[in-house]
Amino acid sequence: MRMRLLHSTGLATASVRARPSAFAGTFAALVFSATVVTACVAMAVSAAGVPASPEQANVSEMGVAFSLVTVYMSIFVIGQVMSLAVAQRHRESALLRAVGAGPWQIRRMVATEALWAALLALPVGYGLGAVLAWVWFDGMAGEGLLPDGMVLEVGLPPLFAAGGVLLVCSQLGGVVGAWRASRTRPSAALADSAVQGGERPGRVRGAASIVFLVGAGALTVAAGAGPAEDAASVIPLVLLAYLVAIGLAGPWIGRLATALVAPLLNRLGGVAGELAVAGCRARARRLSAAITPVALVTAFAVAKFVSLTGAGEPDWMEIFGTLLYAGFAGLVAANTLVMLTLERLREFSLLRTVGADKRQVVAVVVAEGAVIALAGAGSGVLAGCAVMVPLGEKTGTPVSGLPAWVWAATLLSGAVLVWAASCAPLGRLLRVRPVEGVTRRSS
C-alpha cells in the first residue's frame, strides 16, 4: 500500500511539474469554493446559537440557503475546472500509457493530485472565508439585520464543512476528468501536431445534454405549478440544471457562435479574424470549458437582478447575496479563461516563428474572446430567461421589470470579463522567445 501511495504521489508530482498552470487553476477554484462555504456556514451556525426570533430565522435561512447553493455551484464548477486541468495533460497521460502505465494508475494519479490540491486549498480558503464572514457580519450589523446577542463564530463547523465540500468535489471532478484520460490510446502520445481540444464530442455527451435540458424544463414547469415560496427557493437549482445542459452542449454552442460571428470576423478582422475563426472551430471542445463559467455568472446575474428589481427596495442581505454569487462565478470564469490561455504557449510561439508579431497574437485572442463572450453570455441570458420568465411572474419579479441598461451592462460585463481574463497571461507568454516556446508545453 505504501509503495502504491508513493508511486501515485510521484506521478502526480511529475504531472504538476509538467503543467503547473493546470494545478494552479484547480487550486484557485478550490480556494474560491472553500472561502464562500466557510463564510456561509459560519453565518448559519452563529445564527443557530441565539434565541428564536424573526431576525434569527432570516439569518439562519439565509446562511443555509447560501451554503446549499454554494455546494451545488462548487460541485459544478470544480468538476469543470478539474476536467479541464486533466484534459490539458492529455499528452502526458498518453505518454504514461505508452511506457506501460495502466488506466488505474492514471486515475489514481489524478485522485492523488486532487486530494493534495484540496488539502492545500482548505487552510487558505478557510482563512479568506473567515475574513468574508466578518465583512458580512459587520455589514448586516450596521443595517440592524442581526438578532440580539448574535456573535460571529468561525470555528470547527465551517472548517469541517469546507473540508468535506473540497474533498467530495475534488474527487468527483478527478473521477470525471481521469476517466477519459485513463482510456487514452498510447498512440495518441505521438500526435504531436494535434490541436488541443479538437476532439469531437461523443454521442453520450449530446444525449446527456438533452436529458438535462428536458429535466430543467420539467423542474421549471413543476416549480411554476407549486406555491410562490417554493418557486423562489428552487430557482438556483433549476438554473444549475440548465447550466449543466449548457456545459455538456458547450462544443455545439461554441460552433454555433463561431458560425454566427465568422462572417464579421473574416470581413473586418483580417488575418487575426480568420485565425480566430479557424481556432474556435478546431478547439470547440476545449472552448466549452470557457463557455460554461461565463454562462454561469451571466445566468445568476440575470436571475438575481430580476429578483432585486422586483423586490422594490432590496435590503443589504439581498445585495450581498447577489455580489456573493456573481463574485464566486466570475472568479471561477476568470480562472478558467486564464488556464485556457496559459496552455497555448506553444501555439502562440509557432505563430510568431512564421511571422506573426505580438500585436497580431493579441488580436487573435481578442477575436476569439468575442466568440466565447457571445456563446457564454448569450447562453447564460437564455438560461436566465428560461427560468425567470415563467417563475419570475410566479414570484412577483417579472423579467419585464428589468431595465434595458441592466441587460446591456450584463452582456458588456461578460465580454469584458472574457477579454480581461483571456489577455491577462499574454504578457508573460509573449516574453518567452518563440524558439523556446515551441519546445515548452505550458507556462
Image (cartoon, helix red, strand yellow):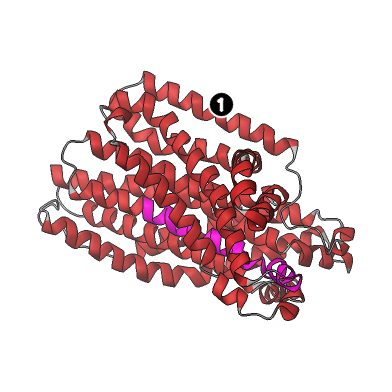
Q: Nearer the viewer, residue 354 or 183?
A: 354
Please tell me how crowded label 1 is: few (under 14), some (14-19), or many (20+) other residues with Cα within 10 Å. Answer: some
Query: Residue 343 in the image: x percent, y percent?
Result: 65, 66
Residue 140 among magenta residues:
no
436 lies above or below 135: below
Relative side of 247 to 237, left or right: right
Q: Which residue is mark 1?
A: 214
In the depicted structure, whether residue 217 falls above or below residue 90: above
- In the rendered structure, the answer to whether residue 442 lies left or right of residue 214 reads right
Can you say whether 158 is above or below 215 in the image?
A: below
Give the x, y percent position of residue 228. 29, 25
In the rendered structure, which amino acid carries the disc numbered 1? Val
Secondary structure type for disc 1: helix
Q: Residue 175's quadrant in the figure?
A: bottom right
Give the residues in magenta.
326-355
Who is closer to the viewer here, 13 or 322?
Answer: 322
* Residue at x 64%, y 74% (from the top left corner): 443
Q: Main secondary structure of the magenta part?
A: helix
Kindly identify the residue that appears in the image at 71 percent across and 54 percent down.
197
* Depth order, front residue of 270/206: 270
Q: Residue 375, image x and y in percent?
A: 55, 43
